Amino acid sequence: MDTNSTHFTQPKAPDKPKLTVRLKQKGILRPYTIVTAILFGCAVLIYVLARFSTPFAEFWARYPSQGLRFIFAKLTTWIPFSLAEALILSLPVLAAAYVIYSNRAMNRSDSPRAFWNCLMPLICAIFLLLSYFCLAFGPCYFRNGLDENLGFSREAVSAEELRDCAVWLSSEIEAIEDQIAYGASGQSYMPYSYYEMTDKLNDAFATYAAEADYISSFRASVKPVVLSVPMTYTHISGVYTFFTGEANVNVNFPDFCTPYTTAHEMSHQRGIAREDEANFVAFLVCMESDDVYIRYSALVNLLQYVSSALNRADRELYAQVYRSHYPAALRAELSAYSKFFDEYRQSTASTVVGAVNDTFLQSQGQTQGTQSYGLVVDLFVAYYKAELSDI
């Protein structure tokens, strides 16, 4: 019997699905970006409070920000060169490396977020710098005025008061000029090394701060700028770089400028932000030193500010004081300085840097911008009337 059989083919089992692992795209808000954003928000809040509350700014400048500035200064003081200068000089190389790395990273990824993943670290780095400024140095611009912390008040200054101050300063210079070494050109010479000078100034700061409650002292190195000659074309004799905690000094200027400039930058490092106040603290600290050349530096530099103000107020009176009271050695020193500066006097770099510095200072409440350096005269006249006029 024929048997009809039907052949049923077993249906093919479906293929097992391939195991695919879909990598989760990392978002822009990584942990470090969140931490940076929170820190920046807190820093801006502190800075805004300082701008609108002088008592808060004074408290913050004396205590929390002092601790931050101390830590950064100590972290970099052992580096034998200026870290800030090295970072600035290496910026083109670092920028090029960052662009190349980011470009390659974006080419390897098809994610639309690749661009932001490469850019976000740079944004966070900038925000961290801004945060540190807002916490460590920015509030110091809005603390009590130095005259208030010293216990005297600024008033309008007359030409006669400027004359009295110029005469006092020139007489102090004349009293010690026989202890100063001058060269054939009339320029004085510092009788020790730059590093010995910074040690002496650290000692002077410690002595001064022991009697002043508005400023504290710590020992830190002050870095000489390697490219001091090119820096001179900007007319900058020193700079405090808050992001490394370093005080940096242009050592191309004549010797009599160096101790005073160093003390000025050290004042910034210790929380005196306004330029006129840093100038005056530098004078007070230098005068506290037992070293005659450091005191000479303070006297000559401050006399330059007073002389300039007197010349603007009354040219005839200034000429009279210059002829009658400035000792010959001092006139030779100032003449040598003028000849030195002739090479750098007119430069595009000084115009650009001056404009940037002027804008920055005005943004921090110093309405007179770079002219605020000269306001040290008001402080000195008030100090002279309160402390020196009866001596």
Image (cartoon, grey):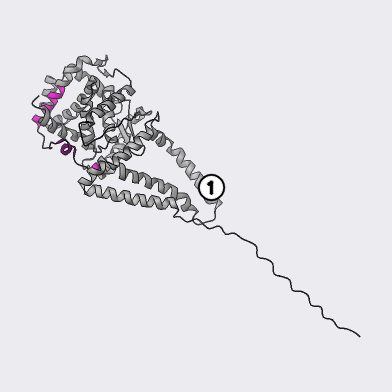
Callout 1 environment at 10 Å: few (<14), some (14 to 19), or many (20+)?
Answer: few
Q: Amino acid at mark 1?
A: Arg
Residue shown at the point (29%, 41%) measured from the top left: 65
Q: Position of residue 214 (x, y in %)?
A: 21, 37
Would residue 114 be seen by someone viewing this image from the given angle? Answer: yes
- Residue 106 in the image: state x and y as whole percent: 52, 51
Residue range in magenta is 141-170
Q: Would you say 89 lies left or right of 347 here?
A: right
**In the depicted view, which residue is nearer to us: 340 or 245?**
245
Q: Position of residue 284 (x, y in %)?
A: 20, 29
Quadrant of the snapshot with the N terminus: bottom right
The residue at which mark 1 appears reads as: 104
Q: Residue furthest bottom?
A: 1
Quarter of the rendering containing residue 335: top left
| Along the viewing direction, whichever of 293 and 11 lies nearer the viewer | 11
Q: Quadrant of residue 140?
A: top left
In the displayed orientation, state which residue is furthest to the right. 1
- 98 or 134: nearer the viewer: 134
Residue in the image at 26% along x and 18% along y: 188
SS for callout 1: helix
Q: Residue at x 36, y 34 (%)?
A: 74
Image position of 101 (left or right of 71): right
